[in-house]
Image (cartoon, rainbow, N blue to C red):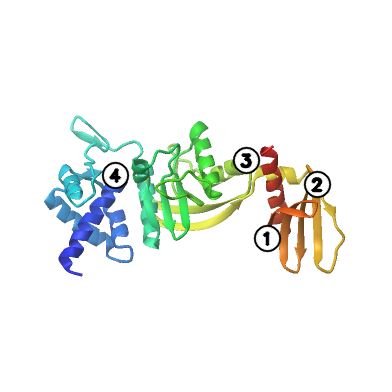
Amino acid sequence: MDKRLIGEWHDFEGLRLVHLFSWMRAKELGMMLWPKSLRSAVNASELISKWRREKWVLERALPSGTGKGLVLSTAGAAYLREQGCSDAQTGKDWGETHHGKWHAPLTWKHELMTLGLMAQLKREGWQVIPERQLRRENNATKFPDGLAVWDDKVLWIEVENARKTGKNRTALLLALILASRGMAEPMSGLVANQAMLAFATNTLDERGYRVNHRDNVIAALAARAPVDISLKLAELTVSGVAGVDSLRTRETLIESAAISQRLERIFWRHYPETAELLTNDYFTDGGLDYRHGDSSFGIWWSVRRGETEIASGDVSSAEEAKRALVADWIYRETQG
């Protein structure tokens, strides 16, 4: 491709990213525009130098020596609109200015950590959609810190860098539970079917104590979730106060306390062992048999009315089968 066209694409796509995220640092901009390049930061710095000459961006010195934040200038927003990005606006009002000195918004640490996570995910190949874009395109009751898309996987992302209490904590937990079950509110034509909790592993709170956001949220989810849920954990290593240096992801299964407590009260009956069935245990309630067993085809669970099967599934262990049965039982109770 012609170098001039490549340069124009970098200008448009880079400025569009600044617009979509509200602001951007050179590091994360480079990761998003050149995800496979070892020179991504250098490339971004060179690109920003051009933008300065064109007066397309304004630079804000972030607190705690975390670098400079870029926002669109009036000229930069006008350039984007000329290129077809009709809703582009200047970011000159990001933060506040008092007596000639600019102050970052109170949310800047959270925004920077989210920006770093999204850049890491984009580098890995995910399509990322920031919260600001979602808010422009949707009218929802609760917004994630972002969505990430890969084929049929849609991640609902929540970044935790401060304690949440009351309504905010309840909204966070409910959002993660719904997303993990594929029941999240539709946004921009997408429905999240996986939930991600992101947190820094090496930061301190305002009192100088290390806060275990992971365990705090997992414990709250276990207490509130009506069923077992799968949660993706994004463990972030940060430099300074919020800049993301690395990302490690893993999955964890959170066992619902409601299911665990109900399991302890169940009296399981046993059907006789046969050549086809090594185990076949059950309990009854409301005219239904809740069964699980181990056969030559694998481990299974089944809900039956007489010999008519009305729900079933294949699982990897007897414990998983029991928990699936109790989850179904609780669900049927809630449906009356």
Which residue is located at x 80 percent, y 49 percent? 283
How far apart are the alpha carbons under marks 4 and 3? 36 Å
Q: Residue type at mark 4: give it.
A: Ser
Residue highlighted by disc 1:
314
Circle nearer the N terminus (4, 3): 4
Crowd band around label 4 with a 10 angstrom C-alpha radius: few (<14), some (14–19), many (20+): many
Residue highlighted by disc 2:
284
User: Tag on residue 223?
Assistant: 3
Identify the residue at the far right of this view: 272
How far apart are the alpha carbons under marks 4 and 2? 56 Å
Circle nearer the N terminus (4, 2): 4
Circle nearer the N terminus (4, 1): 4
How far apart are the alpha carbons under marks 1 and 2? 20 Å
Q: Residue type at mark 1: give it.
A: Asp
Whether residue 139 sits left or right of residue 261 in the image: it is: left
User: Tag on residue 22?
Assistant: 4
Circle nearer the N terminus (3, 2): 3
- Figure quadrant of the C terminus: top right
Q: Nearer the viewer, residue 38 or 263?
A: 263
Which residue is located at x 13 percent, y 48 percent? 55
How far apart are the alpha carbons under marks 3 and 1? 26 Å
Residue 183 x %, y %: 53, 46
Circle nearer the N terminus (1, 2): 2
Crowd band around label 2 with a 10 angstrom C-alpha radius: few (<14), some (14–19), many (20+): some
Residue 17 x %, y %: 28, 51
Q: Quadrant of residue 9?
A: bottom left
Q: Residue type at mark 2: give it.
A: Thr
Q: Is residue 295 visible?
A: yes
Is label 3 or label 2 in front? Answer: 2
Q: Name the element at disc 4.
A: loop
Crowd band around label 3 with a 10 angstrom C-alpha radius: few (<14), some (14–19), many (20+): some
How far apart are the alpha carbons under marks 3 and 2? 26 Å
